[in-house]
Amino acid sequence: MSPSERVFETESIDLASFLAASGYPPIIRRNAAGNRALFLFHESTELSRSIIAYESGAALPAKRLLNARSRLFREASAAVKGAK
């Protein structure tokens, strides 16, 4: 991501999984303040709508969410371990 690009950041794997399952690919980095993964998403109006939907309790198919969460967990673990 370039410095001029606006991004949404979250440490929540649940929100990141919802967004990833909705079609928004994250960039995963280690949070500089600790040993946690940071999920970065390119900001857009559509992304904001998806975040609002998540916060409002919107549902996605369970299998799609679980697959996204499993993949993000593996990738986040690798990102944290690799940045040490």
Image (cartoon, rainbow, N blue to C red):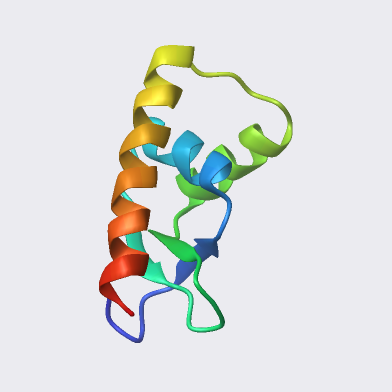
Q: Position of residue 7 (x, y in %)?
A: 45, 68
Task: Give the mark count.
Answer: 0
Q: Is residue 55 visible?
A: yes
Q: Position of residue 17 (x, y in %)?
A: 46, 38
In this rendered view, identify the residue nearer to me: 56 or 45.
56
In the displayed structure, 34 sits above or below 65; it is below
Indicate the quadrant containing the C terminus: top left, top right, bottom left or bottom right: bottom left
Residue drawn at x 38%, y 39% is 20
Residue drawn at x 48%, y 46% is 16
In the displayed structure, 40 sits above or below 48; it is below
In this rendered view, identify the residue nearer to me: 9 or 34.
34
In this rendered view, identify the residue nearer to me: 21 or 29.
29
Q: Answer with the quarter of the image where residue 81 lies.
A: bottom left
Residue drawn at x 45%, y 60% is 43
Q: Position of residue 67 (x, y in %)?
A: 35, 25
Q: Position of residue 66 (x, y in %)?
A: 43, 24
Q: Is residue 61 visible?
A: no
Residue drawn at x 36%, y 84% is 4
Indicate the quadrant containing the N terminus: top left, top right, bottom left or bottom right: bottom left
Is residue 32 left or right of 53 when viewed as pictured? Answer: left
In the displayed structure, 34 sits above or below 22; it is below
